[in-house]
Amino acid sequence: MLVLDASSVLAWAFADEAGNPDAVVDYVEANGAQVPAHWILEVTNTLLVGERRNRLNNGQKHQFLVELAAMPIRVDLETPIRGWEAIPALAERYRLTSYDAAYLELALRLDAPLATLDQNLARAARTAKVRLFS
């Protein structure tokens, strides 16, 4: 089980993104992943923007979402509760957005590695002693 940041998922959808998406996909398919409650909104919004910018077409976007929905990815139901205190405290401490702090909080709470391509989130995770998926 790992915590899956939207940035690492979007590398699967966009061929020009950095990272090693095949390794993350293989790991998630074999072991599952957990995501904060806002994750699907972050993913779908980026896909919509990518479609508007002609980085992928509607058929590709739809197919990606179908494949993603079939993966063993669980949405954390505690994210909204943690959003009142724990997540904003981490955002402030590590100078992150609340969205990124939600990934960090989940990884800390689950004692799980974090898959991310976001440099600020990766830096904060290293400082907080969260393992990064590589």
Image: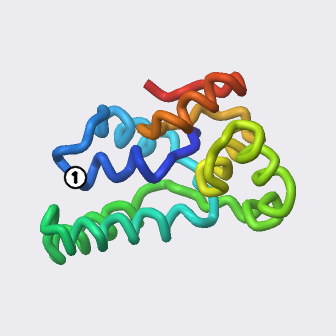
Task: Measuring from the top left, give residue 130's x and y in whole percent.
Answer: 66, 27
Q: Is residue 64 left or right of residue 127?
A: left
Using the image as rendered, state which of residue 127 and residue 62 is in the foreground: 127
- Say whether residue 8 is left or right of residue 126: left
Residue 29's quadrant in the figure? top left
Q: Amino acid at mark 1?
A: Phe
Compared across the picture, whether 84 is left or right of 48 comes to: right
Residue positioned most to the right: 85
Instruction: Please say if 93 is above or below 55.
Output: above
Residue lying at 83% horizontally and 50% vertically, measured from the top left: 86
Q: Is residue 98 above or below residue 38?
A: above
Q: Would you say 59 lies left or right of 13 here?
A: left
When the figure is inspected, residue 131 is found, relative to residue 51, above or below; the finding is above
Nearer to me, 18 or 76: 18
Q: Secondary structure at mark 1?
A: loop
* Residue located at (30% from left, 46% from top): 11
For the point 69% across and 37% down, the residue is 94
Across the whole image, how many numbered discs are drawn on residues?
Answer: 1
Question: In the picture, which quadrant includes the C terminus?
Answer: top left
How many residues crowd mark 1 within 10 Å: few (<14), some (14–19), many (20+)?
Answer: some
Q: Position of residue 49 (x, y in %)?
A: 29, 70
Residue occupied by mark 1: 14
Q: Position of residue 9 (x, y in %)?
A: 38, 50
* Nearer the observer, 103 or 94: 94
